[in-house]
Amino acid sequence: MKLSKRLETVASFVTEGSNIADIGTDHGYIPIYLVEEGRCPHAIAMDVRKGPLERAKAHIAEAGLEERIEVRLSDGLKALKAEEADCIVIAGMGGELVMRIMEDGRHMWGTVRQWVLSPQSDLDKVRRFLEEEEFSIVQETMIKEDGKYYTVMSVSREAKPSQSGYTEAEYRYGKLLIDEKNQVLCEFLQKEQCQLKSILEELKKQSSEGVQNRMMEITRELAWNKEAQDEMR
């Protein structure tokens, strides 16, 4: 099976030999790919909606993998039992939902060795949540596909915490990405900086209390952006 660049990156983070549960599986592409490639012996494709599950079920049948990929209706991790999977994949949804799914799935925290996450928003909140709950970000990357930027991370509670007390820039953009001078992040930061400066110039033409507050927010965001770019030089 041929995956998009984003899904292929998510799949590449899964430790070989893992039994995975793919949360919000949609078409079931990641479980099919990992089992077909021999990376995972068994997978559970899970979704809260019946429609996507039916599509996943059809694709799994087309691939002849019904014996190795189970399809399960579930709100997040609620229908998953401890030790049924040692790797959880949560990709393609907002950061608030990722955190809610992990929070509701506390019964899995003691047996899951790896979490592969790809939040599409609120990355700073996700990183704070992980730190507070004693998860470590072991690996992280940023890719660009069809003009959009995606972050993928491998997270574990077994790994030694990398550090605590990130700077605001590190929460927002990722300490590992900054440290390794990730080139896609470099591009993202430059693009974001231009957008923020443009917004600030437009706001300067207006005058109201709300505008002043917004200008202060943009100025802070520009400072965090600059801090990350400076660290990467």
Image (cartoon, rainbow, N blue to C red):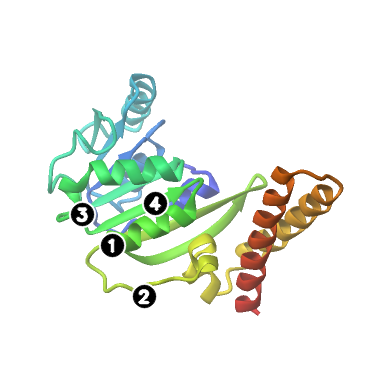
Of tags 4 and 2, the one toward the viewer is 2
**Among numbered discs 1 and 3, the one appearing first in the sequence:** 3
Query: Identity of the amino acid at label 4?
Result: Leu
Point out which mark residue 156 bears: 1
**Among numbered discs 1 and 2, the one appearing first in the sequence:** 1
**Among numbered discs 3 and 2, the one appearing first in the sequence:** 3
Report the Cα–Cα distance between label 1 and label 4: 11 Å
State which quadrant residue 69 falls in.
Answer: top left
Asked if marks 1 and 3 touch (Cβ < 8 Å), the reply is no
Q: Residue at x 66, y 80 (%)?
A: 233
Q: Which residue is drawn at 24% across and 57% down?
A: 17
Point out which mark residue 215 bears: none
Front residue of 72/179: it is: 179
Report the Cα–Cα distance between label 1 and label 2: 14 Å
Query: Identity of the amino acid at label 3?
Result: Val
Label 3 SS: loop
Asked if marks 1 and 4 touch (Cβ < 8 Å), the reply is no
Label 2 SS: loop
State which quadrant residue 46 falls in.
Answer: top left
Point out which mark residue 112 bears: 3
